[in-house]
Image (cartoon, rainbow, N blue to C red):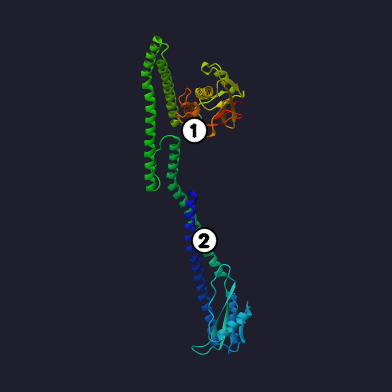
Amino acid sequence: MKARMLLGLLLLGGISLVAVLVPLLGALASARTQSLVLQRGAALTEIVELAATTGERDPVSLQRYLDRFFEVHGESVRVVDGTGRTIAAVGELPDTERADRMLLSARRNLPQYDLPVVLPWSSETALIAAPVRRASEVARGAAMLVVDVGEARADVARSWAIAVGVAVVLLGALIVFSLRFAEWVLRPVRILDAAATDGAIGAGGVDAVPIGPPEIQHLSESVARMTRAREEALQRQRGLVADVSHQLRNPLSAMRYRVDDLLADDPTSESVAALDTDLERLSATLDRLLLLAEAEQRASSRPDDGTAAAEHVTSADALVALFRQRRDLDGLRLASAGSDEVVVGCRRSDLEDVVFILLENVGKYAGPTPTATLALRAEGDRAVLRVTDDGPGLPDEDLPLVGRRFWRAQAHRTMPGTGLGHAVLAAIVHANGGTVSVSQARPRGLAVTVTLSGASWS
C-alpha cells in the first residue's frame, strides 16, 4: 500500500512539475531570443543608416566601419546595392544560398529580423537582413548581419540548468514529503493490521495510537475498544470455566464418597456402578477443562516475539523410559526412534503432558495391544516431536476435526474419554509458540507431529 501511495503522489507531483517546467523553459528561451533580436536588430539598423548616408558615394568609410564592427563583435556583415552587387563586406557567410534569398527579400522592402528560438543545441549563427533606404524611399540596397548565437545559447543553457535544478530540488522535497505523508497515514494502518493479527491468535488487545488522519485515528480507537472488549470477554469465559470446574469439585467429591458408601453396602448394584462410572467421567472432564483453561490463559499472555518461555534438554529415549514406568499406560508398548538429545523450547512438564496425552490416546483408540513409536529430533532451529501408532487410524475426512472440543470420532464414542485431550494438547503447544498436525501413518495408524522451538544439543 505504501508503494502504491508513493507512486500516486510522485506521479501526480512529477506531472505537475513537468507541466510547469516545460512552459517555463520555453519562456526563458523565447525571452532570450527576443533580447538577442532587439540587440542585433539595433546593430543592423546602425549599419543600414550608415549605408544609406554613404552608400555608393563613400564605400571606403562604410568598409572601415564594418571592419571596426567585426573587430568588436566578431560578426560578419554584407551590404549590397539595388542590383545585388556587394558594396562592403566583412567576414564569411555560413550559408550563401540562404543569404542570397534573404538579401533579395530585403531589397524588395521585406525586412528579415526573425530568429529561430535559441535553444542550448541551436546552431552557432543566424542571419538577419534589412533594406537600405531613406525615409519612405524604395530600397536602394540591403544589409545582412550574421548573428553570433553562442552567448545567447549559453545564457539559455544556464537558465535552463537553474530551472531544472530547482525542479529537482522540488522533486526531492516532494519525495521526502510523500514518504513522511505515507508514513503518517499508514502507521496507524499497520497498527490496525497488527491488532487484527493479535486478535486472530488471541494475543490480547492493543492501545489506540493518536497519529494519522482523523478518520484513521477514530478507526484505531474503535479497533482498540473492540479488541479490549474481546479480550475481556475471553478472560471472563476462561475464568468462568475455571471457577465452575473448581466449584464443582467439592460437591463432586461428596457425591463420590456417597457412591463409595453405596457400593460398600451393595457391591452388586448395577445402577450404583453406572453412577460411579459417570462420576469418573465427570471428574476427568473437569480436570481436562481446568488444564484447557490454564493453557489458553498462558497462550493469550505469551509474548509474540518468537522466544521460548523455558528450555530443557531431553531425548526420545529419555521420554520412553519415563513413560514406561507409568501404570496408567499399562498394555501400551513404547518404542523409541532416536537417542539424540535435543533442546526443546518449553517447560519439561509441558512436554511430558503433551506426550502423555498422545500416548493415552494411543492406548485408548489404537487397539487392544497397540505400539506407540516416539521420535524427537532437531530440524534447523525447531524441535520436532512425532508420535505414531499401529492402530486403525481415522478416515481422512476426520483428520481436520481432531482437536475440536468434545469432538470424538464415530468409532470412539462408546469408549471412555472426554473429547478434550487433543484440545488441551493443542492449547499447551500453542502456549509455547508451537504447532500441531495430524496425518495418516504408514502403513497404518495415526501420526501426530508437534513442532516447538529448539536446537540440537552439542
User: Which residue is disc 1 drawn over?
Assistant: 401
Q: Is residue 409 visible?
A: no
Viewed as shown, does residue 190 lie left or right of 369? left
Kind of residue sitting beneath label 1: Leu
The residue pinned by badge 2 equals: 164
Q: Is 255 situated above or below 240?
A: above
Q: Nearer the viewer, residue 155 or 114?
A: 114
Give how far across and how far down residue 267 sits, in percent: 42, 11
Q: Secondary structure at mark 2?
A: helix
On-image quarter of the C terminus: top right
The residue sitting at 62% across, 85% down in the picture is: 86
Q: Is residue 162 left or right of residue 274?
A: right
Q: Would you place residue 8 above or below residue 299 in this image?
A: below
Residue 149 seen from this side: yes
How far apart in space, not on screen, are marks 1 and 2 (Cα)? 67 Å
Kindly identify the residue that appears in the image at 38 percent across and 30 percent down. 237
Tell me the crowding category of disc 2: few under 14, some 14 to 19, or many 20 or more residues within 10 angstroms, Cα based. some
User: Which of the numbered marks, if any, corresponds to residue 411?
Assistant: none
Disc 2 residue type? Val
